[in-house]
Amino acid sequence: MLLIASTALAIPYKVGDFTVDVEVRNQAMNLVPDAKIKCYMVSGRNIIVKASAPGYKTSTRKIHTQDNQFFYKTDFALRDIDHSVNILDLNRRPIASAYARTDQYGFGGNEFGITVFIPKAIWKNAQASQVEVLEPFWGLPFNKTCQISEVDEFYQVKLAISRDALDWSGGDLVVIFKTYVEKDLKVLEDRIISLANLPNVINKRTIAYSLSKFIADNYRVEELRQKFSSLPEPLETMVKEREKFNQLHHENF
């Protein structure tokens, strides 16, 4: 048995005496650039081809070889792993008048795209910095791209995150819009507790920085100091830097 594993796309794969040309796309027919292909022989003359990629369901196909035919072509259209999208405000309350689509038209094959429609009347400050895509358990923000346009009385917000991130996000995603709401300090307390109790994993430092920045970007220094006598170390560092900046800014102006 010959086993081949590769990250290349739309190139021939040699399996014994046979050559298999494989192309991998998603359901929107966009090429998936980081697909992994495995080809191997079974039962003497059958070829198994397996295609996988981050954020997609793995697909397997069997090719029945024929006498005197040594070249075969097979195409995959990988299906998305199911992801629900919850649209919330900063206090984690649902925004009932907003809705999301997860069809992948207009997004790259290595991205997961979310298109949200939110009424203009609700989201007064329509900027990319005022919307985040979070994983649901720890509330960590994903790196994202964001394009905002107007469709009638709605803003159309096209968000894209790397599909690599979906491997550890579970089935749900959260989109938070920073609409004008009175901040619920109990929700802030929950986020601080999550930061203080992060598991001891390899990328803990990166996770802690990401969550600390989300908290620091969305709550004023005064809110944090009034609510907590002490803060987890990475957030404390950020808060001290902002206090220093605010003091210098106040003294100079």
Image (spheres, rainbow, N blue to C red):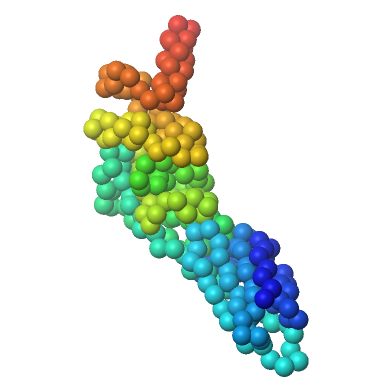
Could you tell me which residue is drawn at 43 percent across and 41 percent down? 141
Q: In front: 63, or 114?
A: 63
Looking at the image, the residue that sits furthest to the top is 251
Could you tell me which residue is drawn at 26 percent across and 44 percent down? 93
Looking at the image, the residue that sits furthest to the bottom is 67
Residue 143 against residue 110 in the figure, above or below: above
Q: In front: 128, or 28?
A: 28
Q: In front: 95, or 196?
A: 196
Q: x, y (%) of residue 170? A: 39, 54
Q: x, y (%) of residue 133? A: 42, 46
Q: Quadrant of residue 21?
A: bottom right
Q: Is residue 196 left or right of residue 237?
A: left
Q: x, y (%) of residue 104? A: 49, 62
Residue 16 against residue 157 in the figure, above or below: below
Q: Is residue 124 visible?
A: no
| Placement of the N terminus among the 4 image quadrants | bottom right
Could you tell me which residue is drawn at 41 percent across and 41 percent down? 140
Q: Quadrant of residue 228?
A: top left
Could you tell me which residue is drawn at 31 percent across and 38 percent down? 90
Q: Is residue 19 left or right of residue 50?
A: right
